[in-house]
Image (cartoon, coloured by chain):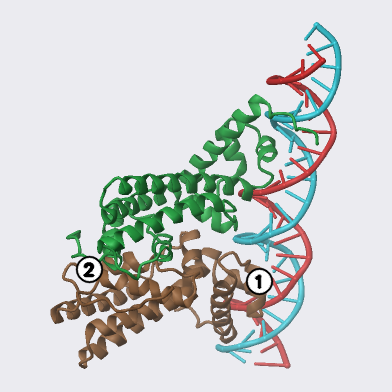
Chain colours: A brown, B green, C red, D cyan
Amino acid sequence: MTQARAPRADAVRNRRKILTAAGEQITQHGPEVGMDEIAAAAGVAVGTLYRHFPTKTDLVAAVVAECVARVADDAEAVLARVAAGARAADELTAFLGRVVEQSVTDRAVKAAAQTLGAEPGDHANEDRGSNAVAALIRAGQSDGDIHPDVTVGDIYLLFSTAPTDQSPAARARWLALVTPGLTTGARPAGNRR
Amino acid sequence: MTQARAPRADAVRNRRKILTAAGEQITQHGPEVGMDEIAAAAGVAVGTLYRHFPTKTDLVAAVVAECVARVADDAEAVLARVAAGARAADELTAFLGRVVEQSVTDRAVKAAAQTLGAEPGDHANEDRGSNAVAALIRAGQSDGDIHPDVTVGDIYLLFSTAPTDQSPAARARWLALVTPGLTTGARPAGNRR
DNA sequence: ATCTATCCTGAACCTTGGTTCATCTTGATG
DNA sequence: CATCAAGATGAACCAAGGTTCAGGATAGAT
């Protein structure tokens, strides 16, 4: 078998530029940014885009994959902190708050993913994330802080519908409204207009 | 001032056909249905569409307006029932369940509305709806069943993001997860998977 | 220094989908 | 029944945006 020659240096450099530029453009101007705009932002010609990502769908999928990886990293970091003695329920809600805030950034990304039907084929990272969250839930449940019914699926269900185009205050309020469904404790005051 | 002649009979008929066809097509095949497809479904030529609705945005806005009106009617009916002695909190959650189910039908409609930036200019019906809901909330609060913090804005916040592409079971679970944030009572068993 | 496979460029292509308009049809009025 | 303005038709128009490709540049190996 012929060991394919290593990719050229500038090719690697360009791939990175494209990926970051695509992320920025999509989050700023929504999923409907043109390929030409992304190319311009990356300082590259359209053809180069298509050399690295044969179709727009593929490009978006790649961007989404990066987001998933970021979240998975966060989740695992949290899990480590809990293993070191932090209170699981608190860490979980804090984590979820962060996810909501991130989902503002990624809202366009998510939307783009759905619109283009970009299967996140990145099962590896996705599983890393949900495994960590599952562990987090179990920990909170054995502490008695999280309701025994709650599953990872519930988290998905709720947070796949987190408000994105609202104000930060609205997002905080949303989190406060949703939390009581997950926890057993007294509901936090979290009041606002 | 010249009293404009009454619209022709077939024009009225066509307008109805277009509106219903548009509703069906959009809910079935998503917001991205072509104007030609809608026209075909209505048994009408494209030009006729544009005679009644100068732009796609306008057409979608009209469809949305009908949905809003439907929900508003429901809300007012519920309010009447409560005035007749029904328990406010129960009626409210039942109503919200219905809204979620409807939002499955209207998901595409909503999406289309956002996508096209269709301002729902139909403030009249919208206000009818939120006034009724507000009254419902107040009633539930004086019963002690609904948490004193809760406002109409909260309802919007939650239900504008209700899950739509999930299964009926998932939607029920979602409702069960969200309800504790609104009510004061013990959380309903609502367990699943 | 030379050579070539890899990579880049960007104008042109092509499909998709909203919108228009000249022409024909038809419901209502006298 | 005659008349005509309101309404309907649908082929054609046009812009937008994803995609291609022939030709030019360059990193890296010899």
Name the subunit of mark 2. Answer: A
Kindly identify the residue that appears in the image at 67 percent across and 47 percent down: B55
Q: Which mark is residue B43?
A: none
Kindly identify the residue that appears in the image at 23 percent across and 88 percent down: A82
Residue B47: % across, % down: 69, 36
- Of residues C15 and C2, the one nearer the viewer is C15
**Is residue A182 among the parts visible in the rendering?**
yes
* Amino acid type at mark 1: Glu
Q: How many marks?
A: 2
Distance between the alpha carbons at the discs numbered 2 and 1: 41 Å
* Amino acid type at mark 2: Thr
- Of residues A124 and B139, the one nearer the viewer is B139
Callout 2 environment at 10 Å: few (<14), some (14 to 19), or many (20+)? some
Residue B96: % across, % down: 34, 54
Q: Which mark is residue A37?
A: 1
Q: Is residue B27 above or below residue A56?
A: above
User: Viewed as shown, does residue B103 lie left or right of B51?
Assistant: left
- Of residues A88 and A117, the one nearer the viewer is A88
Residue B132: % across, % down: 41, 53
Callout 1 environment at 10 Å: few (<14), some (14 to 19), or many (20+)? some
Residue A22: % across, % down: 56, 75
**Is residue A66 among the parts visible in the rendering?**
no
Q: Is residue A124 above or below residue B56?
A: below
Whichever of labels 2 and 1 marks the residue nearer the N terminus, that label is 1
Name the subunit of mark 1. Answer: A
List the residue tagged with mark 2. A151
Query: Mark 2 and mark 1, same subunit?
Result: yes
